[in-house]
Image: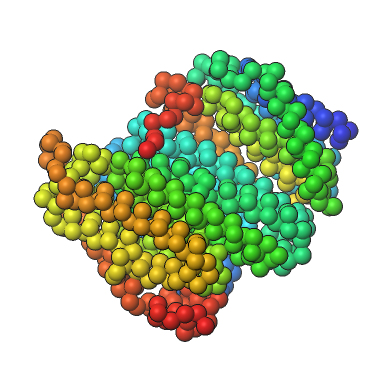
Amino acid sequence: MLILLYILFGISLVYIASTEKFRHYIQIYAMQGILLFGMALIELKDFYFLNLLLILAETIIFKSVIVPYLLRKIMQRTGIYSVHKRSLKGNYTVLLMMVILGISLLLAKVLSIPSVNKIYTVIAWFTLFTGLLLVSVRKYLFGHLVGFLIIENAVFLFSMAIGSRFPMLVNTGILLDIFIAVLVMSMFLTKIGHKMGGFEADTLSQLKD
Amino acid sequence: MLAIYFISGFLLAGLVFVFPRKKSVHVITLIAILLQASFTAYAFFHRGETELTYFTFDPLALLFQGILVIISSATFYHTINYTKTIDHLNRSFFYASFIVLNLALTGVYASNNLVITWIFIEITTLSVAYLINFHRSKTSLEATWKYIFVCSVGIALAYIGILFAGAASGIASSGNMSFAGLKSAFLDINPIYLKIAFILILAGYSSKLEVFPLYTIGIDANYVSPAPVSAFLSTALVNGGFVAFFRIFEAMSGTIIGIWINHVLMITGVLSLLVAAIYVQKATNLKRVFAYSTVEHMGLVLIALSLGKAGIYIALLQITFHSLIKSGLFYQTGILHRVLRSYKLVKSGGYLRMNAIGAVILFTGVVLICAVPPSALFRSEFLLLRELGLNNVLLFIIVALLLTFIFYGVFQKNMKVIAGEQAHAGEPGDKPAWSEYITQVILFSAAMVLCFYIPSFLDDLFRSVSGIPDGSFNSIFNTLA
């Protein structure tokens, strides 16, 4: 079952990197939230109510409901529904993703930690590089925001891979931080659109020496 | 006491929305500052104690908490002028962000746990957003977006580094990520894991430290923010980045990769100096000149850290003195803007004729930030260059050359503003009140006194953090035995 979730998660990363519709970005991101919930549930060792509640909040409520809702609002307000015409085409992105997968496999092998599940590490590295790829190749800031969210998913996967058991308060703090970061970024993204008259990353080039 | 401080602080931050009138907001913020000062005094009297499990009043926390009180008080004093004309809601947002930022910085300074430090560092990023976007112009929006985005990505990378180090040491699965625990756990782990973790953490926190490679967002944020906010960003917030980084450095420097870490820090420091040396010459705006000067000083701090215990002592001197002088300089730059109506070098000139007192204070600040005696920075930079000369002559030459370039850039650009031709022919600017100079005079005087004399309580903090024995460096001319 866990293997199936890993594979689905990997496919979702390839899809999110190659799709040109922002609608698909949101749907895939919401789906990743559900997949992460499944993985966390299977891996859960201390099965008590509060722990379960936190995982539920972090994955389903935050990643699959709240953030997709915020992203949809931004998409509607900005009126931009697909990636920039000058963005890297889907087929090239798929090729890049294959390279990234190779690097992730290599890293997971070279840097394997005995106590850490190797497949988790592969998926975590793959997620991190996918997020960084989106941040670097997408022209619209919306793509950058989704890239950041994918990097946050990588953090979640790394955290799960090492089986970190931080106290509830600490976990809540991390979750709150990420939530506010997304909220603040969404707010500023909308403001940028109104003030700058565009959402291309290139519009943010007034500050230079 | 810490719980009371945090809860009351957050309540006060909320209260500025309940009582949004100008006077009420200022009084509430003043109460928050007084609360901070009282908490700091309490922490000094309870040195070494741990509260709420995750916070310890160790010498490093006390040193930076003390600096924070000084800078936040002076910053609040100068922001009063800036928030005079804005509407109630914006003023409330501004001061609420300011109070939360101060609380978050206390959290960063006093935290004894890697993950808790990370949480508070992220809070500083979010709370500073409103302060950077104060002017709501296109450029301030651009700088704010870049700051939040790059910092958040950088901090996420640092967090992955933290998890990686925790996993390799086996400490993460226990959930105990205290710095004390990390120190022993790092002793016998595979160096490659430590190296990767260190690189991720340094790269991630470089956005806060304002050093190579993610220094640019700090420069832009300093440039677009109101001058008092720039003062706060380039001192208290940078210090937060330093503390977060230093605690990990301390835990890792005693391991097998200690020498490798020193090399990385030295390279990062020199690259930061190089960036500052090039861009100070290119800068066309006075605030950017001072922002690059922060990159220079933080680069020197990293170089100092690579020199062992004596280097840590020097780094602490450098960062303390820099905080006093740079904040004063930014406050003074804010006054200059009201007189000349511009930060642009091409539009500035003749400041001496238009505002003689302001020009003299600005000149004093420039002399002090360039580490010219009687600047306290002369003391730290002299010690640094001497240690470098004793350890690595080539590096000594490179650093000395880069410092000369930076000195030339900062001095020449400021002299153009102070004594150059008056290029601005628009309406004459404001006439600042004498009371607006008080904080700068106090900060600069302190920086001059510290060149010759360091009070014993302060020296004790420096020595406790660095671990150098009493008596060494009592005079800048004697060496560490």
Q: Is B392 left or right of A133, judged from the image as shown? A: left
Vertical position of residue B8 compared to residue B466: above or below: above
Seen as rendered, the residue at the extreme right is A1
For image coordinates 25% across by 42% down, the residue present is B345
For image coordinates 50% across by 61% down, the residue present is B395
Q: Position of residue A166 (x, y in %)?
A: 71, 53
Q: Is A23 left or right of B139, judged from the image as shown? A: right
Q: How many numbered badges does the structure rendering display? A: 0
Q: Position of residue B90 (x, y in %)?
A: 35, 38
Q: Is residue A59 visible?
A: no
Vertical position of residue B133 compared to residue B59: above or below: above
Residue closest to the eye, B69 or B223: B223
What is the quadrant of residue B40 in the picture? bottom left
Vertical position of residue B361 compared to residue A14: above or below: below
Residue closest to the eye, B49 or B135: B135
Q: Is B105 left or right of A109, judged from the image as shown? A: left
For image coordinates 65% across by 38% down, the residue present is A152
For image coordinates 67% across by 52% down, the residue present is B197
Seen as rendered, the residue at the extreme bottom is B471
Residue closest to the eye, B278 or B116: B278
